[in-house]
Image: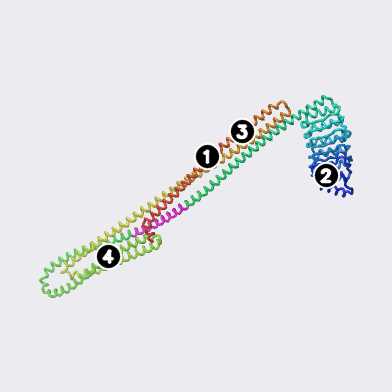
């Protein structure tokens, strides 16, 4: 308030006028702290009115302004009321005893049209009714105003025409509750006009008409209409209170339901997070298992490739063995053909020897002379026979040595083959090349030995042919020795055949074992793939079931939202019905009991609906808890299945490792 006084003094000084001491004193009184500026019975100058009119727009430091009996001029009233048009804090205005005229009435009409804060207006002792044009402007402003609640128009010389204007204004005004028209000249016509306006005005609760020459029946009718308005206002206030209570209950129910829904959504989010975490963990475990299975598959693939490589190596070795067998068979056939040729030659030689013996018997007589010469020749032949025997013995030794070398080389070839099979994991290509080289070398050696044997046999045959003519006398010994040599050769050949057959049987047994191990590994791989496919199918089924549970949760959420919307629509319908019933109450006073019963029924219906909704929510929460329990059980089953799959994978891995370690390849790798 002091700041308001300072501003007032500054504006007066700016206008070149001295501020009024009485106004400054009233502005500085402690009563201003209670929100009231009392300038009653103070003669306010035009400069003071102008300054106050410039200070009043906006927010003023008081809520009540008393300007009664101030002797305000028309211009001063206009300036003050112009400032109050845009004021937002003044709620009570007192202008009694200021002898307002046309300009003042017009300013009051403008004030009522523009101001939205004034609730009480006192215009006692102003003679507004004399100025018909100004009073009509005032009534127009009152018609447009919807904020004024109390209006005092006592002693304003209002006649029946002014009362008619005022009645027309009251028909459209919806905020005025108290109107004081005592000590005016309203009369019968004005009283009837006011009585008629009360049929459409339902807010006016107090109307004072004493001292207006209004008949008693009109006064009674006015009192009845006012009582009706008061009763209506009481009913409306009661209904409004009930509506407010119901709305508060509805809001509380909404808040409670929202809290429950938010709690439910929080639990659902937490469960979703837990399920997401469990799914992530399960996915990580599945990935680990998949990686382990991939490793096992890669190991199995590597084993398959190694098996294929060993099979290829075995196929090559078998092909080479077959080639060697074919070569041996060819050699045997050649040897048989050579033996048959030798046998035929020996038969021919025997026949020739017999013929020669006959000729010799016939020629003994002629040869006796040459006995000495023959004896010498026999000595020489004996020496030559000894040499030939030595050569035959050397040939036998060479044959035994070659057979032993062949056996040793065969044993060495088998050992090298075994070592090459054991070392196929590290350097299969080197092993293959070494094997090829070794076989080539063996074949070359065998071919060289065969060629040397053929050369020796040819040389021996040449020597034998050259010496047959000379050894006719000692053919029996040579034949016996040759027969022994042939028998030994047959024995050597049969022994070589037996050893070759044993070696082939041994290789076939190894090949059979390798094929059996390959079949077992393939069966294990197939079983592991089938188990993996079954696990994947189970995982897919579980994911589908989890998706179904999620869809069920979404459906339950949609059902809950639909229930909430139905509740809101029902509440809106209830509100609409309440508004309709309130409208009926305005027209029918006698339907009050029925309205109360309907309100009670609606309350019961609302309570029943709320209880039903609570029961439905409880049922839905039970279903959700059951579904969550099922989901937890499914997750436990998934974890159990994953553990079983992990155990199976570990068992399979241990079995494969045991098999690999137990196989010849595994022993070779463990030795390495």
Task: Single out the mark in the foreground, 2 or 3.
Answer: 2
Task: Single out the mark in the foreground, 4 or 2.
Answer: 2
Numbered range of the magenta stretch: 291-320
Q: Is residue 256 above or below residue 10?
A: above
Given contact means CB atoms under 8 Å apart, are the residues at marks 2 and 3 in contact? no
Query: Dominant secondary structure of the magenta stretch?
Result: helix
Q: Residue furthest top?
A: 217
What is the C-alpha distance between the residues marked 2 and 3?
61 Å
Report x, y in % for residue 120. 80, 37
- Element assignment for label 3: helix
What is the C-alpha distance between the residues marked 3 and 1?
25 Å
Q: Residue at x 67, y 36 (%)?
A: 247
Residue 100 appears in the picture as rendered: no
Among numbered discs 1 and 2, the one appearing first in the sequence: 2
Quadrant of the rendered image containing residue 488: bottom left
Q: Residue at x 19, y 72 (%)?
A: 384
Give the label on residue 70, or none. none
In the picture of the structure, the residue carrying the numbered disc 4 is 404
Does 317 lie within the magenta span?
yes
In the picture of the structure, the residue carrying the numbered disc 3 is 609
- Element assignment for label 4: helix
Among numbered discs 3 and 1, the one appearing first in the sequence: 3
What is the C-alpha distance between the residues marked 1 and 2?
75 Å
Give the label on residue 626, or none. 1
What is the C-alpha distance between the residues marked 3 and 4?
111 Å
Q: Residue at x 31, y 57 (%)?
A: 506
Among numbered discs 2 and 3, the one appearing first in the sequence: 2
Q: How many marks?
A: 4
Among numbered discs 4 and 2, the one appearing first in the sequence: 2
Disc 1: CA contacts within 10 A as few (<14), some (14-19) or many (>=20)? few
Given contact means CB atoms under 8 Å apart, are the residues at marks 4 and 1 in contact? no
């Amino acid at each position: 308030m002091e700041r308001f006084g300072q501003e007032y003094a500054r504006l007066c000084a700016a206008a070149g006028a001295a501020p009024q001491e009485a106004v400054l004193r009233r502005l500085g009184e402690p009563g201003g702290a209670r929100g009231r500026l009392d300038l009653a019975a103070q003669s306010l100058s035009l400069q003071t009115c102008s300054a106050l009119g410039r200070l009043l727009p906006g927010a003023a430091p008081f809520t009540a302004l008393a300007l009664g009996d101030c002797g305000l001029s028309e211009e001063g009233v206009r300036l003050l009321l112009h400032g109050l048009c845009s004021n937002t804090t003044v709620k009570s205005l007192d202008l009694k005893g200021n002898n307002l005229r046309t300009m003042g009435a017009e300013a009051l009409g403008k004030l009522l049209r523009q101001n939205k804060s004034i609730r009480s207006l006192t215009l006692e002792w102003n003679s507004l009714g004399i100025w018909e044009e100004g009073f009509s402007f005032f009534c127009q402003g009152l018609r447009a105003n919807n904020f004024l609640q109390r209006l005092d128009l006592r002693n304003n010389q209002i006649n029946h025409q002014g009362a008619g204007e005022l009645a027309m204004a009251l028909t459209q005004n919806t905020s005025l509750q108290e109107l004081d028209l005592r000590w005016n000249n309203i009369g019968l016509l004005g009283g009837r006009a006011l009585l008629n306006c009360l049929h459409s005005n339902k807010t006016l609760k107090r109307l004072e008409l004493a001292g207006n020459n209004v008949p008693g029946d009109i006064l009674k009718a006015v009192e009845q209409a006012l009582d009706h308005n008061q009763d209506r206002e009481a009913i409306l206030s009661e209904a409004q209170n009930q509506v407010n209570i119901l709305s508060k209950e509805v809001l509380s129910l909404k808040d409670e339901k929202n809290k429950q829904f938010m709690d439910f959504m929080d639990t659902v989010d937490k469960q979703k997070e837990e399920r997401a975490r469990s799914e992530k963990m399960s996915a990580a475990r599945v990935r680990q298992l998949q990686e382990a299975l991939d490793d096992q598959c890669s190991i199995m693939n590597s084993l398959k490739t190694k098996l294929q490589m060993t099979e290829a190596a075995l196929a090559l070795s078998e092909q080479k063995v077959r080639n060697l067998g074919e070569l041996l068979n060819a050699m045997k056939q050649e040897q048989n053909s050579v033996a048959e040729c030798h046998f035929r030659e020996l038969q021919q030689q025997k026949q020739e020897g017999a013929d020669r013996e006959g000729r010799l018997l016939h020629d003994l007589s002629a040869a006796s002379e040459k006995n000495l010469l023959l004896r010498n020749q026999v000595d020489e032949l004996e020496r030559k026979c000894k040499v030939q025997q030595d050569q035959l013995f050397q040939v036998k030794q060479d044959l035994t040595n070659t057979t032993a070398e062949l056996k040793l080389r065969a044993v060495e070839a088998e050992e090298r083959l075994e070592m090459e099979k054991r070392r196929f994991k590290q350097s299969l290509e080197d092993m293959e090349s070494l094997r090829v080289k070794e076989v080539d070398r063996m074949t070359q050696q065998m071919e060289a030995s065969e060629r040397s044997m053929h050369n020796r046999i040819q040389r021996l045959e040449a020597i034998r042919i050259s010496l047959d003519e000379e050894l006719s006398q000692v053919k029996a010994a040579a034949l016996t020795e040759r027969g022994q040599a042939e028998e030994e050769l047959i024995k050597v050949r049969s022994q070589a055949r037996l050893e070759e057959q044993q070696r082939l049987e041994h290789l076939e047994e190894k090949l059979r074992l390798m094929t059996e191990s390959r079949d077992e590994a393939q069966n294990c791989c197939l079983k592991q793939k089938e188990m993996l496919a079954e696990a994947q199918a189970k995982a897919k089924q579980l994911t589908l079931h989890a998706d179904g549970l999620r869809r069920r949760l979404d459906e339950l959420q949609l059902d809950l939202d639909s229930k909430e919307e139905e509740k809101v629509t029902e509440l809106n319908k209830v509100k609409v019905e309440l508004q309709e019933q309130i409208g009926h109450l305005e027209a029918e006073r006698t339907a009050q009991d029925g309205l109360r019963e309907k309100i009670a029924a609606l309350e019961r219906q609302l309570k029943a609906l709320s209880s039903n909704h609570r029961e439905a929510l409880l049922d839905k929460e039970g279903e959700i808890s059951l579904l969550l329990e099922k989901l937890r059980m499914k997750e436990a089953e998934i974890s159990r299945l994953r553990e079983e799959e992990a155990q199976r994978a570990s068992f399979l891995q241990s079995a494969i490792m045991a098999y690999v370690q137990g196989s010849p390849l595994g022993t070779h790798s463990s030795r390495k």
